[in-house]
Amino acid sequence: MDSTQAALLKRVRSWDQDALTQVYDEYAPALYRYAYRLTGHRETAQEIVSETFHRFLLALKRGGGPDENLRAWLYRVAHNLVIDQRRRQPPLDPLPIEEAPDVAVHEAYDERVIRREMVAQARAALQHLTSLQQQVVALRFLEGLSNEEVAEIVGRNVGAVKALQHRALNALRRILEGDDGD
């Protein structure tokens, strides 16, 4: 752990309001993007971020929380909340494009609809991966973290992260290309 993060964690543990604000300001936007990308719902992502920080404060109050890597600890909590949310309320299947109502619209709207459909297809494909594969793909490619950072967050070594990433990308390619292996 670098000395800057160690100093920040020390200030957080002493309930320094500026340090707590700094942690929220630094990590909340990234956690929101992460949760939104995995759930596809703004309100759900906001609830996940809120609950992540609530659990962070409770852990600090009880003398727990992160000892070294604050970001890894927060992402693990957020990911567990995403999984809990999926168990409680599985995602709805998006309306197939063929069943969408016929509407005469201009090109910019058409492009947004196509983009949304592509995002929906990618999100649906992600749902077919294991939870760990989803987490690795989201952290590595959507959040732009290094393999080393992802390894620390998911609690695996870099080689395992690379293997998970490789299998996940192959599975996504097969799913999106419509090749189910038959």
Image: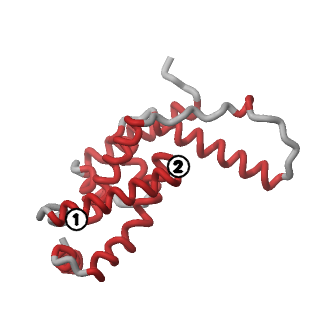
Residue on which disc 1 sits: 69
* Badge 2: residue crowd in 10 Å (few <14, some 14–19, many ≥20): few
Q: From the viewer's perspective, is 81 left or right of 11?
A: right
Residue furthest top as drawn: 182
Q: Is residue 164 above or below residue 7?
A: above
Q: Tell me the amino acid under the disc marked 2.
A: His
Q: Position of residue 164 (x, y in %)?
A: 33, 41
Between 84 and 132, the one lying in front of the other is: 84
What colour-coding does the image apply?
secondary structure
Disc 1, SS: loop
Note whether residue 107 is visible: yes
Between 1 and 30, the one lying in front of the other is: 30
Q: Position of residue 165 (x, y in %)?
A: 37, 44
Instruction: Work out whether mark 1 precedes mark 2 in sequence or the reverse, and give the earlier one.
Output: 2
Question: In which quadrant is the N terminus drawn?
Answer: bottom left
Q: Tell me the amino acid under the disc marked 1.
A: Asn
Distance from label 1 to label 2 (Cα)? 28 Å
Q: Residue at x 56, y 34 (%)?
A: 176
Q: Nearer the viewer, mark 1 or mark 2?
A: 2
Q: Residue at x 65, y 33 (%)?
A: 95
Q: Is residue 180 above or below residue 163?
A: above
Residue on which disc 2 sits: 41
